[in-house]
Image (cartoon, rainbow, N blue to C red):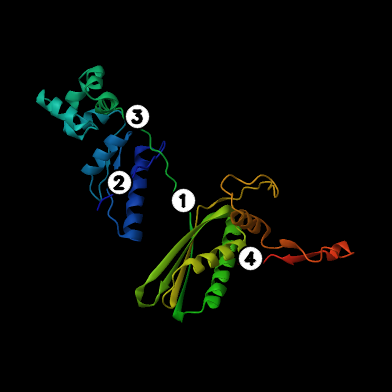
Amino acid sequence: SAASWYLDIGKLTPRDALLLVEELGESLSRQFSLKAVFGLAAGKFPATVAAHKATANTPVLVRRGDERAFLARLSLALLPLSRDAIEHLQLLGMTTICQVASLPRAAIAVLDGKRGQLAHRIAQGDDPRKVIPRPVARTERLERSFDGSIDNSLHLDVILSEIAAELAQRLAASNETLRTLALSLSLERGQSVTGQRRLHEPTSHQAIIGRALMRLRAQLEITAGVTGIIVMARDLAPVAWQQLDLFGTPAPTLHRREDLLTVLVDRADAHGLYAFEVWEREHLALEQRFRVSEVSIA
């Protein structure tokens, strides 16, 4: 199947643009065994048409100012018009883009609204649509495979802790945090199980990542020995320092105590969290009336 992409080449000269697409084509062929064709023009529509006329080794360049002439003899059915508008124009005896370009823009607007106005501009060689950047979200992937299978949850948690440590190091090196963790376990007999967890807050802390992975592992239905582990860190973002209000009003989504406790644990790394309970209410020494115990996080 074919896919298409647009690339804004900025202010490159035609010669430099042709050299660029030649290098892109060679790179796609060498690294991914993909065949690519390239069309170069000042607008998305003429560039698309040019790409359809190109071959793998011969890109088609439409020089600035030549767009209208390049499109003139092509079928008007290529324009971004509704089917009804195309049929209406064909009933009037029109077949080519240059015939649409010769019409008053108001007539096309009456026929097909904003789509008609855009199609008329394109027919005249003026495609106003910009190439909108769509940056690919960066992820981190860590993988482990085993000669045999592992069926001991404690052993799995040790490996997950090691993965968490490596992931935390990578995040620290790139000065990033993660928000989503995905865990995929390959099982014997070709099976696999996958889970995903979105953290309450972005983090790069090893202990928090480790706990999240262990919770994910505990939620998965593991019916056979584990032969491989894949951990994906998603929603990466630069570290954003902020002042945290430990005793402020919880966010609206944190109505339940369990949710609030999870957030506090993530912030405090499970250290310094204690529970107080009445022990000997009538004891003469105040400190003996209560018992303090460290909270155990499951």
User: Type of residue at label 2?
Assistant: Ser
- Residue wearing tag 1: 137
- Residue wearing tag 2: 4
Q: Would residue 272 be visible to someone looking at this image?
A: no
The answer to which of marks 3 and 1 sits earlier in the sequence is: 3
The answer to which of marks 4 and 1 sits earlier in the sequence is: 1
Pointer 4 local density, CA inside 10 Å: few below 14, some 14–19, many at least 20: few
**Residue at point 60%, 45% (across, down):** 251
**Residue at point 24%, 19% (across, down):** 110
User: Type of residue at label 3?
Assistant: Pro
In this view of the protein, which residue sits in the foreground, 226 or 46? 226
Give the left or right position of residue 198, taking residue 244 as reference.
left
Quarter of the image holding residue 258? bottom right
Q: Which of pointers 3 and 4 indicates the residue nearer the eye?
A: 4
- Residue 128 got which mark? 3
Q: Secondary structure at mark 2?
A: loop
Pointer 2 local density, CA inside 10 Å: few below 14, some 14–19, many at least 20: few
- Residue wearing tag 4: 297
The answer to which of marks 3 and 2 sits earlier in the sequence is: 2
Tell me if residue 174 comes above or below residue 109 in the rendering: below
The answer to which of marks 3 and 4 sits earlier in the sequence is: 3
Marks 2 and 4 in Cβ contact (< 8 Å): no
